[in-house]
């Protein structure tokens, strides 16, 4: 029962999702207004729409490799042996949770794992955290060359890098981790979570071992590279000249904006990621605000909102996910 205190009621999570969707709609309107709604409409009418399914196929490629990583993590803890289709359902059902404030809804994945396999919730949450950290390292690596070209982004790059490596290193230093947990036990209000903290640490210690983190980051690099290539095709569809330079810029812009969106703690990075994508396109390609806004709307649909849609469909066909 104590573990369930980590979780909010499913209805509360859904309410937070609705807040995220509303926030996304507001961001859409702001982008449309800043880019001039009529001009964006004309730009989208001239967009070569054959490239949208191409971009979506690269998004699915991203999801496929990230699922392999998720399933690797799930079966790397306590040898759960969870069936692949059940693992896939939980993975896809987690997509909409990314647009809850602070991504707090993603703790539901820990609850779903407990229902499916009996894994303690805190250990399930450690898988979610490991996912996020390996993804963060992957997009950092992909954005490295771009950061060298644009030194103004180094501070944000280094801050995220230091935070991620600090978490990984701490997870492997058992005395330090146990010392922090011992402190938690002495602090009123949060001491009741000390047993959860221990289970979370045990899961993180296993998932962040060198071999596991290497495999996870490698899969992450390849999967997020796929989304960057998808963004490249969207830019080509908008009329940009194809080539390696455009591909490099597309990968850098999407990777670094993913980092900005993540550290913002906003639902799905909404607002921060869009502003970063549009602004960096204007900086790197010298494009107009209309073209930058159009490209941003298209890539966010092909990545974030496409995933949210897949997740909601999974919710509809799997109502037992939200049963008490």
Image (cartoon, grey):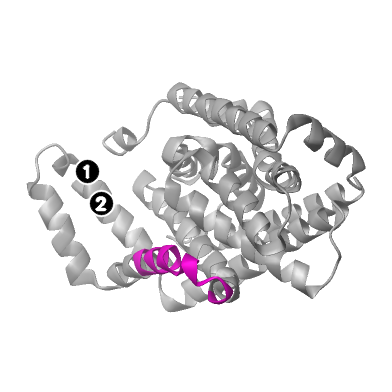
| Tag 2 near tag 1, CB within 8 Å | yes
Residue at 49% in and 42% down: 109
319 magenta-colored: no
- Circle 1 crowding by C-alpha within 10 Å: few under 14, some 14–19, many from 20: some
Q: Position of residue 195 (x, y in %)?
A: 22, 48
**Helix, strand, or loop for circle 1?**
helix
The residue lying toward the viewer, choosing from 244 and 83, is 244
Residues drawn in magenta: 148-163
Asked whether, in this view, residue 161 is left or right of residue 309, the answer is: left
Q: Is residue 104 visible?
A: no
- Place of residue 316 in the rendered image (x, y in percent of width and height, measured from the top left): 67, 26
Is disc 2 placed on a helix, strand or loop?
Answer: helix
Residue 107 sits in quarter: top left
Instruction: Kindly identify the residue that appears in the image at 82 percent across and 33 percent down.
Output: 41
Dot 1 corresponds to which residue? 193
Tell me if residue 196 comes above or below residue 40 in the rendering: below
Tell me how far mark 2 sits from mark 1, CA to CA.
6 Å
Could one spot residue 183 in this view of the protein? Answer: yes
């Amino acid at each position: 029962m104590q573990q369930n205190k980590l979780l909010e009621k499913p209805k509360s999570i859904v309410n937070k999702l609705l807040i995220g969707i509303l926030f996304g709609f507001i961001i859409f309107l702001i982008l449309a207004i800043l880019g001039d709604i009529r001009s964006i409409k004309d730009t989208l009418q001239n967009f070569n729409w054959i490239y949208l399914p191409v971009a979506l196929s690269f998004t699915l490629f991203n999801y496929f490799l990230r699922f392999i990583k998720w399933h690797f993590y799930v079966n790397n803890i306590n040898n759960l042996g969870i069936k692949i289709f059940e693992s896939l359902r939980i993975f896809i059902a987690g997509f909409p949770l990314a647009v809850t404030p602070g991504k707090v809804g993603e703790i539901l994945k820990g609850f779903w794992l407990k229902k499916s396999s009996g894994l303690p919730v805190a250990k399930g949450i450690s898988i979610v955290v490991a996912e996020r950290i390996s993804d963060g390292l992957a997009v950092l690596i992909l954005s490295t060359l771009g950061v060298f070209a644009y030194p103004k982004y180094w501070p944000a790059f280094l801050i995220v890098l230091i935070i991620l490596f600090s978490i990984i290193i701490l997870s492997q230093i058992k005395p330090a981790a146990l010392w922090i947990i011992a402190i938690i036990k002495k602090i009123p209000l949060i001491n009741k979570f000390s047993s959860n903290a221990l289970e979370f640490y045990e899961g993180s210690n296993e998932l962040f071992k060198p071999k596991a983190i290497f495999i996870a980051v490698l899969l992450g690099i390849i999967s997020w590279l796929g989304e960057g290539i998808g963004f490249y095709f969207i830019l080509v569809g908008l009329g940009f000249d194809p080539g390696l330079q455009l591909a490099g810029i597309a990968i850098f812009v999407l990777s670094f904006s993913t980092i900005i969106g993540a550290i913002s703690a906003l639902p799905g990075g909404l607002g921060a990621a869009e502003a970063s994508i549009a602004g960096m396109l204007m900086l790197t390609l010298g494009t107009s605000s209309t073209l930058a806004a159009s490209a941003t709307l298209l890539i966010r649909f092909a990545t974030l909102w496409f995933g949210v849609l897949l997740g909601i469909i999974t919710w509809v066909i799997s109502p037992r996910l939200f049963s008490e």
